[in-house]
Amino acid sequence: MLININKAILHILDFHSGVTVFSQQELDRESNSVATFLTKHIEKAYSGQNAKSGTFHDTSKFNYRLADYLAGRLDFTSFSVFVAEAMYTAIAQSETLDSTDVIVCDVAIDGKPVIGILKCTNKVGFIHQVVQENEQFKNDIINHYAILPGITQRIEEYAFIDVDSLEIKFVEKKRSVNGNEAYLIADHILECSSRISPKGTLDLVNSIAKTVAENHGQSTVTAALKSKSYIVENTEVSDYLDPVELSKAVFPASPIMQQEYVQEVQKAGIPEVVKIDKDLAVKAGKSHKIKTDTGIEITFPVDYFESSEFIEFINNPDGTLSIALKKIGSIVNK
């Protein structure tokens, strides 16, 4: 992933000390520290599969300000202050007053123009401090309340706006703002819709398959494995997943269960046709993990379920289940 930083600015919203500082100058893009921090975090966030997608509401103030900035009617600093002020107002009205450094950036990702908003919630950490007492230097350890995420960590809340298509993707947790559950960035800053993430979609369709199977007294393991197998196989021929076709593959002998599955998918807000990332589907579908009521956990390749050569599920006469693991050459402790 090639990331070029055109402009970036950082604003401080410190609810711990009550100090709010809106920067009047951009970050120095030539600084190695700034460049490393931004490129590493943007790469991790932008390539993640947990992001929800959305589009601007017709009344979105952010969309109007963005249009002004892109047209040159609004300078970058003023545009970023609008974002920071909106975030400050929303946090001030929420139950959790988390001190935050908000970074607004204008970047090119693989040649595509993108506006990024990174909400860096301050962490409490320890740093050293040099003080002078009685004409002697003393090294001390103190609490610091404004630690930024390290480059090995992920920023927990962020949004990216594709400048050309105005498509939005964001990651954040819901919080209580003015007594209502809401997304801080999506609802109070961007003012956009929210659609489930690719990873969330895969987790949800597999979960629904298990629920429907359980409702009809069938094996939840079989349903989950059939669901995963179909998703992986489908990505070989299409970038899109049709939940109706998935229901037929998971419950081929039961039109009633197929119908129930589709109904649950619709209730969950999953679209009729879902775009699926192939790499994500393959990664999520290559193995399956089960846990028994006796506390034993087993992870095995999904392909093994179709054959009893390596693993076999046995229904015992007393109603219990046994699992036989076969052709084991060695066991490694982990």
Image: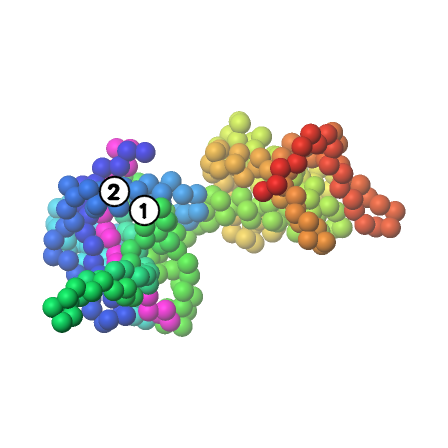
For badge 2, the amino acid type reads Thr
Marks 2 and 1, how far apart at CA: 8 Å
Q: Which residue is mark 1?
A: 151
Horizontal and vertical percent position of residue 70 = 18, 45
Residues shaded magenta: 94-112
Using the rendered image of the protein, determine whether residue 247 is visible from the camera's viewpoint. no
Q: Are marks 2 and 1 in contact (CB under 8 Å)?
A: yes
Pointer 2 or 1: first along the chain: 2
Frontmost residue, 265 versus 306: 306
Callout 2: SS: helix
At a point 40% along the width and 65% down the height, the residue shown is: 175
Give whichever of 4, 266 is nearer the camera: 4
Q: Taking 116 as reference, is 119 above or below it?
A: below
Q: Identify which residue is drawn at 15% across, 55% down.
A: 78
Q: Residues within 10 Å of mark 2 (few under 14, many from 20)?
A: few
Give the image's coloring scheme.
Answer: rainbow
Expressed as whole percent of the image width and height from the top left, the position of residue 313 reads 76, 40
Rendered image quadrant of residue 173 = bottom left
Residue that badge 2 annotates: 36
